[in-house]
């Protein structure tokens, strides 16, 4: 740290000494002042980065703690669901503008079914889909050909 301060001070004082000897500004003095200023600015940035990491304790990479956020789903602005693992237990939490609240404690990982989001039909389990199709098959369909739509967009 002291070496950086000494180098920066020397780099800033050299152009002043060079400028005092010659009657006007020279290229070497301006270049040395520019390099010195650059070193000073980079040094300040590095010191602030070090202090921010030390004081704010920003985690670097994966931490080996006991709390882990498995997944977060945003439902609306300032509203989301979070699946959190705490000491081997899984908790489903609701996060909103008012605060965080527990919805359900999931006992085992096997209860959590991971579903890839392909289509709405893929999200419905097979047995439920068959029952819905059987129920919908007994209902009359209210479809109209394209030519029979009224001006208001409804059926004529």
Image (tube, rainbow, N blue to C red):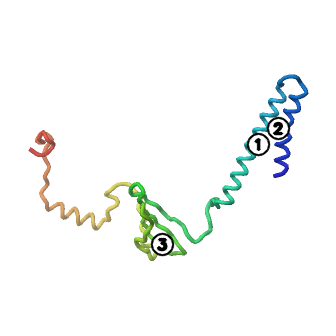
| Residue displayed at 44% across by 65% down | 99
Residue 154: image location, x then y, percent:
13, 45
Q: Nearer the viewer, residue 125 or 103?
A: 103
In this view, the mark in front (1 or 3):
1
Secondary-structure class at tag 3: strand
Gap between marks 2 and 1 measured at Cα: 9 Å
Gap between marks 2 and 3 measured at Cα: 58 Å
Q: Are marks 2 and 3 in contact (CB under 8 Å)?
A: no
In this view, the mark in front (2 or 3):
2
> Vertically, is 64 above or below 154?
below
Q: Are marks 2 and 1 in contact (CB under 8 Å)?
A: yes
Of label 1 and label 3, which has the lower sequence position?
A: 1
For disc 3, the marked residue is 90
Secondary-structure class at tag 1: helix
Give the residue at the far bottom of this rendering. 107
Gap between marks 1 and 3 measured at Cα: 49 Å
Q: Which mark is residue 12?
A: 2
Residue 131: image location, x then y, percent:
23, 66
Q: Nearer the viewer, residue 69 or 134?
A: 69
Residue 143: image location, x then y, percent:
14, 49
Of label 2 and label 1, which has the lower sequence position?
A: 2
Of label 2 and label 3, which has the lower sequence position?
A: 2
For disc 1, the marked residue is 40
């Amino acid at each position: 740290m002291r070496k950086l301060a000494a180098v920066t001070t020397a780099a800033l004082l050299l152009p002043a000494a060079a400028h005092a000897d010659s009657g006007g500004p020279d290229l070497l003095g301006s270049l040395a002042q520019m390099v010195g200023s650059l070193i000073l600015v980079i040094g300040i940035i590095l010191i602030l980065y070090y202090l921010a990491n030390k004081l704010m304790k920003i985690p670097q990479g994966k931490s080996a703690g006991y709390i882990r956020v498995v997944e977060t789903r945003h439902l609306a602005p300032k509203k989301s669901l979070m699946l959190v693992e705490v000491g081997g237990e899984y908790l489903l939490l609701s996060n909103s503008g008012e605060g965080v609240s527990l919805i359900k404690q999931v006992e085992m990982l096997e209860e959590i079914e991971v579903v890839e989001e392909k289509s709405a039909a893929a999200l419905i389990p097979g047995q439920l889909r068959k029952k819905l199709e059987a129920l919908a098959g007994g209902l009359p369909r209210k479809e109209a050909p394209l030519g029979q739509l009224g001006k208001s967009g409804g059926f004529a």
